[in-house]
């Protein structure tokens, strides 16, 4: 084994106030009208900082009226800034779903991807940060020794990339390429790898994470510790259990430490463990959540007649809503409900690829149905971005498909103050076509998309560029934070090598208190570190500043006219 500064609108339209809004100027208003615009959750400014009794006893009483007046203006200005910063349109309104009361589509209008944004992007590109970290040289040399299988991925929870070569796994710091470590204690080829938090009161305190490895014959849980910035994998497995013939293709863990496995037989499994074993239970076991208990009593040829294998290639967990999604290699999406407390599992609904393509074609019939299939990946839409929309799926043509798990009439009715029921299905609500589908567009279209990722208004796709290289397509609405429709800038960049994985390094949390919805990135850019997107290729690891191309001063963004979407 080897080893606040809180922004109340600075840099936004609400920050650059005219001097006419202050005392002594012609436009100054001394009434309390600003208080009626105070946003929910923000208390109006109070006038009780200095009591009249204290003021009369003060030697500076002559200055108090002016001081109180200035504080009043400051309080009202701050309230107005917060109101302005929180006035961005909701995603469901930008997609015009609530206005039309039916599924909608976008991407065909030139204003959806304005050319002015592309010119601006070229100017802003130098402001973004793109860090290229080559793979450790020792790993490059190991590629020559692959005998059966090799795969790669990212573990953002611990800031590590991983590479498996046959039965060995290598870990290293993807931010700088340091701290290369390896584990060679397995005898069979490794099919997949994942990381999980340990459940409390089961292991020793020094076990910070569990490295989950699945081979062709067993599932192994290894303890992971850190000494400073150096990672250490404990060589003796904490738990090991047989796969019983299930080839595990993907591993995903929840924040609470639940470990889910997607298998080649199309089943969703979970590895559970406890600190003690009983008469009728084992300390560690594998549970099948896709098939009923009676199916295990039936002969295999009967099971084969009722169950068609669709290998699960992706698992996505929505922590805020306690939901889990799976995607099969044939494009079937399955929704599982983890329960209100996140401790159960029940299969709720599914949509086959044929159902998805038919529904998409009904929404935008002018586009060939082949553009909606097959699927390249799925990503969450976090509740802080949209309470109504839950999931976005990408086709290999770069088409985005937005889904909700709520009844459609619930999302187009009154605003959701509290969930009326648990999530009950999958409904396609919006189709977003990528650049190049507009009649007047001269842009190239993405094709043969291999990997995809979405997070808070930014979409990243990878598609082949040449024999051994990929291109990434990045579309982001950060450049148009206050647009009433979904308007995006986009960029295409060529990479070295094939894209293996795309993740978000870190969490984009809102820092504005009292607001249910996260404000646009331009509002909080001075108060939180930028999110970084990490792209792992077969040759290097790239880290992009999360606001790498599209985050600009809002005054500049406002120079885009919402009607013509051109620079004035």
Image: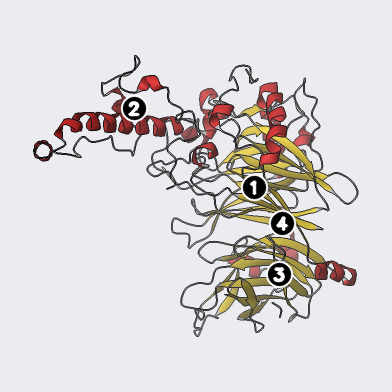
Image side of residue 252 versus residue 9, left or right: right
Q: Residues within 10 Å of mark 4 (few under 14, many from 20)?
A: many
- Name the mark nearer the viewer: 3 or 1: 1
Q: Earlier in the sequence, mark 1 or mark 4?
A: 4
Q: CA distance from mark 1 to mark 4?
A: 28 Å
Image side of residue 217 versus residue 201, left or right: right
- Name the mark nearer the viewer: 2 or 4: 2
Q: CA distance from mark 3 to mark 4?
A: 22 Å
Q: Earlier in the sequence, mark 2 or mark 3?
A: 2
Q: Earlier in the sequence, mark 2 or mark 4?
A: 2
Q: Residues within 10 Å of mark 3 (few under 14, many from 20)?
A: many
The residue labelled by disc 1 is 545
Quadrant occupied by the N terminus? bottom right
- Name the mark nearer the viewer: 2 or 1: 1
Image vertical order of residue 150 relative to residue 316, above or below = below
Q: Position of residue 25 (x, y in %)?
A: 34, 17
Q: Earlier in the sequence, mark 3 or mark 1?
A: 3
Closest to the observer: 309 or 464?
464
Q: Position of residue 272 (x, y in %)?
A: 56, 72
Closest to the observer: 534 or 204?
534
Residue located 53% across and 26% down the image:
101
Answer whether labels 3 and 4 touch (C-beta < 8 Å).
Answer: no
The residue labelled by disc 4 is 313
Q: CA distance from mark 2 to mark 4?
A: 49 Å
The residue labelled by disc 3 is 171
- Name the mark nearer the viewer: 1 or 4: 1
């Amino acid at each position: 084994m080897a080893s606040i500064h809180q922004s109340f609108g600075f840099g936004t339209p609400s920050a650059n106030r005219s001097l006419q809004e202050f005392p002594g100027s012609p436009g100054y208003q001394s009434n309390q009208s600003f208080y009626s615009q105070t946003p929910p959750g923000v208390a109006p400014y109070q006038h009780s900082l200095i009591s009249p009794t204290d003021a009369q006893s003060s030697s500076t009483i002559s200055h108090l009226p002016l001081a109180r007046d200035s504080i009043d203006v400051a309080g009202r200005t701050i309230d107005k800034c917060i109101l302005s910063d929180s006035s961005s349109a909701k995603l469901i309104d930008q997609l015009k779903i609530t206005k039309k009361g039916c599924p909608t589509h976008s991407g065909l209008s030139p204003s959806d991807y304005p050319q002015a944004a592309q010119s601006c992007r070229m100017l802003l590109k130098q402001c973004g940060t793109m860090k290229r970290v080559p793979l450790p040289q020792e790993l490059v040399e190991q590629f020559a020794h692959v005998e059966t299988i090799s795969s790669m991925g990212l573990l953002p929870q611990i800031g590590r990339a991983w590479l498996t070569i046959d039965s060995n796994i290598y870990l290293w710091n993807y931010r700088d390429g340091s701290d290369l470590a390896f584990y060679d204690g397995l005898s069979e080829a490794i099919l997949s790898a994942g990381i999980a938090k340990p459940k409390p009161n089961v292991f020793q305190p020094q076990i910070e994470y569990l490295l989950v490895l699945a081979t062709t014959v067993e599932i192994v849980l290894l303890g992971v510790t850190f000494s400073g910035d150096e990672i250490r994998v404990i060589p003796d497995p904490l738990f090991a259990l047989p796969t019983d013939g299930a080839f595990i293709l993907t591993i995903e863990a929840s924040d609470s430490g639940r470990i889910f496995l997607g298998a080649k037989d199309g089943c969703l499994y979970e590895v559970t463990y406890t600190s003690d074993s009983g008469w009728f239970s084992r300390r560690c076991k594998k549970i099948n959540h896709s098939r009923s208990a009676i199916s295990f009593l039936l002969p295999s040829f009967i099971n084969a007649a009722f169950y068609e294998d669709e290998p699960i290639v992706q698992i996505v967990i929505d922590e805020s809503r306690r939901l889990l999604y799976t995607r099969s290699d044939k494009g079937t999406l399955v929704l599982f409900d983890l329960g209100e407390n996140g401790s159960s599992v029940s299969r709720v609904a599914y949509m086959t690829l044929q159902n998805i393509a038919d529904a998409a074609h009904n929404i935008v019939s002018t586009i060939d149905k082949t553009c909606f299939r097959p699927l390249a990946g799925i990503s969450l839409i976090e509740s802080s971005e949209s309470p109504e929309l839950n999931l976005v799926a990408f086709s290999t043509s770069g088409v985005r498909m937005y889904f909700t798990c709520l009844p459609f009439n619930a999302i187009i009715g009154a605003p959701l103050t509290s969930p009326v029921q648990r999530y009950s299905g999958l409904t396609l609500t919006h189709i977003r076509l990528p650049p190049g589908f507009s009649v007047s567009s001269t842009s190239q279209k993405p094709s043969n998309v291999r990997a995809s990722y979405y997070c808070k208004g930014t979409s990243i796709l990878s598609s082949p560029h040449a024999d051994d290289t990929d291109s990434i397509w990045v579309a982001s609405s950060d450049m148009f934070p206050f647009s009433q429709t979904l308007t995006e800038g986009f960029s295409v960049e060529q990479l070295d090598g094939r894209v293996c994985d795309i993740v978000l390094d870190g969490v984009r949390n809102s820092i504005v208190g009292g607001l249910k919805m996260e404000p646009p990135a331009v509002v909080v850019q001075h108060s939180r570190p930028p999110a970084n997107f990490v792209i792992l290729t077969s040759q290097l690891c790239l880290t992009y500043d999360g606001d790498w191309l599209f985050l600009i001063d809002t005054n500049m963004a406002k120079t885009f006219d919402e009607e013509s979407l051109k620079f004035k």
